[in-house]
Amino acid sequence: MTDLAGLETELRAAVRGEVGFGVTARALATMDASNYRRVPTGVVAPRDADDVAAVLEVCRGHGVPVVARGGGTSIAGQATGTGVVLDFTRHMNRLVGLDPATRTAVVQPGLVLDRLQEAAAPHGLRFGPDPSTHSRCTLGGMIGNNSCGSHSVAWGTTADSVRELDVITARGRRLRLGRDWAGAPDGLRELVAGDLARLRTGFPELPRRISGYPLDALLPEKGADVARSLCGSEGTLAVLTEATVRLVEAPRARALAVLGYADETAAAEAAAGLLAHAPLTVEGMAADLVPDPAGLPRGAAWLFVETGGETAAEARARAETVVRAADVLDARVVTDPAGQRALWRVREDASGTATRMPDGTEAWPGWEDCAVPPARLGAYLRDFRSLLSAHGLRGTPYGHFGDGCIHVRIDFDLLSEPGVVRFRRFSEELADLVVAHGGSLSGEHGDGQARAELLPRMYGAETVALFERAKAVWDPDDLLNPGMLVRPAALDTNLRFAVLPREPVPVAFGYPADGGDFTAAVRRCVGVAKCRTTEVSGPSVMCPSFRVTGEEEHSTRGRARLLHEMLAGELVTDGWRSTEVRDALDLCLSCKGCRSDCPVGVDMATYKAEFLHHHYEGRRRPASHYSMGRLPVWLRLVDRTRTAAVVNALTSVRPLAALAGRLGGIAPERAIPRLARETFSRWERRRQHRRARDRREEARAGRRPDLPARAVFLWPDTFTEHLSPSVGRAAVRVLEAAGIGLLPFPARRRRKRRSDDGMSLLDPRRTQACCGLTYLSTGQLDQARTVLRRTLDLLEPFLQQEPGSGSGPEPRLGPEQFPSLPSSLSPSPSASPSSSSEVGGGFPAPPFVVLEPSCAAALRCDLPELLPDDPRAARLAARVLTFAEALERLAPGWTPPRLDRPVTGQTHCHQHAVLGDAPDRRLRAAAALTGDLVGGCCGLAGNFGFEKGHFEVSRACAEEQLLPAVRQAAPDTVILADGFSCRTQLEQLAGVRGRHLAEVLAEALED
């Protein structure tokens, strides 16, 4: 039995990098992007090759296996193991050198591919292979798997780009591998010399033969390339510490021909014929993986064929030649780089999109990347479809059609014993089918545990025995990644789902997309690791805390892994009380970026709220949960007692503010925002009274008031109401200028009684609508439900039916909506209705316009998920509009004032993730506000940036995109920030006043 304490002690003494034997470190490495799970003994992040050698020496002495791990995006299980895992991403992640003259680069194994591409691009160079995980996969992982990517028809596999490899063997030998037997360990030449015939005839000639060891690279006629023979060995032969790789010249211009076909088989049969035109890519996918086919040519399947050239005209001409040569239903040639990027994002996200069938059923890897000769791809797909049908399975193939390589996720039932039996039987029959078509079991991601057991069906027993002998030459003690490639574990063991509970656990949210099952929600994370991207791409948000810390536990995937282990109960044993899960979630900003940016729709903000709800149930919470989590209560108390000026005066005294901050769990670096002396609702009530008086006077004079044909309720969210009522006043000005009237927001007085949350002294005199945001973000879900039910009770007269249903009663706009207005002068039912919210007889049903994006997102998304059994919740969610949506839907003919000024700022995280910003972009364009807002997160994120211990992370998030954009802006640039948090962050960190779009437009109207 291994002495774990002794092993840990020796490793800590021997290496300079981090050694993690704790629950969190081990939990984060239990899985990769495959169906498999193994609990490692420990994790080491080596600083250099000396550390790697030291780990191997210590582990060899204890007989503990070593597993090399890069980005953990492997789909066959080879990045998991029960021994010590080497994490190269933390320290050994440098680009050591780049030589444009020789077109080579020297890299460490933990370097992310995109960082190499960025360094090579100024020289007109690039690394040829480019998997869809290019933003987070590492060069070491690519070499271990012999990765390929979409451009392999032009530039081959990773093995084609490797020149030399520096490795350390399990017994500590440091070797530099290359051609002509350079670095070959003792016995390798003799092994090859003794089996030349088998090496020359036993390996199929395929562009994507990734399965097994590529021992044929050691043939004399192939240059006896020891480095190439190690590519695709999945860390089972030696540990890579440095690599010299070849770069290729990048085309100066590119064009993308998108070819439409009737079905995937037609597309597959056409792919091979296009290779004669020397394309850069020939990628294929079907309609099942395209949520929105807008921008694609007519068809049910498409080929993406990229061409290059010295000029844009040359690239386009080559693309048009491809179109003419292809027998297609329809085609489109895209030369605009932005348009090409948008189309490629559809393809790259397929690895995540494919994890759900169109009906929401889960689908899994396992047979992710078989490859056959390109000319046989169409016939193979037909047989593959027949095999799926015979087993009652479904899958949506896509992938590298030009190389005959197909990716597919299949709706295996890996949760039940009969389902696992069918998984094995299907795997065996599919392996035979692939071999019958002259193919390779793996065409990109390697064999791992998913396919290694079936290698004898492809190579035969004698060639597999040769693989075992090669493994013994390199690693006679079977120390490196045992159970992979040779003497493999069975493909139906170590399944990661086996440890999860079979019955749904009791939870607060409804999880409608996952059948109400929190376990199924956590299973959404399949490990594609888009959340580990180290730089913001376009408008994306996910995952800001990971980009700041670089720690796996602060990524969406890392948190999902810990939740998985919490549910499993094997490694994380204290369930909802787990401090490891709590600490990992502590730096989650609840930005909801993963809800939209994650290809599989993981919603960590909701999972965090759920966890905090259970974690603190019946226990004392952090002070910030009482101070900021119950912010609406405190602010209404201030309003009720008319003490805003007093509070502002007290918090302006530094010692008093510091004391308040300590008591409230607020970061000492933060200033407490000033309260408005007059709330928005008080201002609006005064305005409504003046309007009512004016209308009565007009009525007495016999004149009919000019009433708007459309009217809305303006939601009095906590931030607009108490902290920035200027935004509300500006929105009123703009909405009325657009011909949209405002209805007095419903409110009713309540008798003083003890509230459901036990805070009787703090009950306001009015029942006011609230979205419950602050309770949600701090996981106070019982209080959130109470607040939201009160809101629904208050608004119930306006929520009798679904908007647009056209049946049933609905309150009309009459005297009760326009106080003191004679009924004869009320808005007529014949008035023009709003575009989407109307009731019986075509009468308008007023929507609720919410100015604060986070509150709008809470109402539209969290409300129906927290109260799934209350039909009023869905009705209210459907009635919520953002400011820009209201103008676009209710006043489509209105033209905003023209500003002719540039803008910068940041799209609110929740707007990006839940609401969408297309109407905002169109409104800005109509007002001649030019430029785009940056992606990422401001870092304040409601209570997060104010909480003690979060300031540095909060500031680092802002420094990523927002603050640099503001500093670099021209003097006349409009700084847009629709969220109160974003405006506060700008003010406190940059001394800049950000403005809501409503304020900008209102000011222009005044001018």
Image (tube, rainbow, N blue to C red):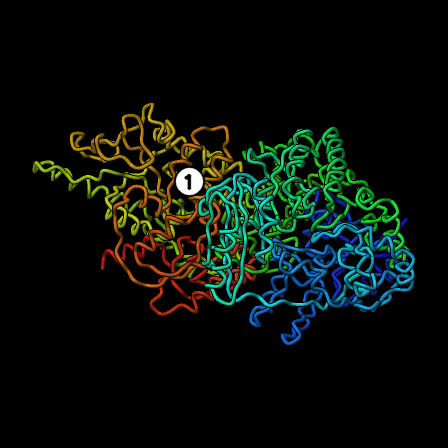
User: Which residue is nearer to you in this view: 252 or 356?
Assistant: 252
- In the image, taking residue 262 as reference, residue 224 lies left or right, namely right
Vertical position of residue 693 compared to residue 126: above or below = above
Number of numbered discs visible in the structure rendering: 1
Residue holding disc 1:
770
In the rendering, at what x and y percent does residue 323 appear?
A: 49, 51
Q: Is residue 7 visible?
A: yes
User: Which residue is nearer to you in this view: 936 or 213?
Assistant: 213
Q: Which quadrant does the C terminus fall into?
A: bottom left
User: Which residue is nearer to you in this view: 855 or 103?
Assistant: 103
- In the image, taking residue 581 as reference, residue 67 lies left or right, namely right
Residue farthest toward the left in the current orientation of the protein = 701
In the rendering, at what x and y percent does residue 785 appear?
A: 49, 35
Vertical position of residue 475 compared to residue 573: above or below = below
User: Mark 1 belongs to which amino acid?
Assistant: Cys
Secondary structure, mark 1, is loop
Vertical position of residue 100 compared to residue 694: above or below = below
In the rendering, at what x and y percent does residue 142 appear?
A: 70, 58
In the rendering, at what x and y percent does residue 756 appear?
A: 49, 34
Residue farthest toward the top in the current orientation of the protein = 808
Residue 981 lies in quadrant:
bottom left
Q: Is residue 943 visible?
A: no
Residue at the spot 74% in from the left edge and 57% down from the top edge: 144
> Mark 1 Cα within 10 Å, few/some/many (few <14, many 20+)?
many
User: Which residue is nearer to you in this view: 112 or 87?
Assistant: 112
Residue 87 lies in quadrant:
bottom right
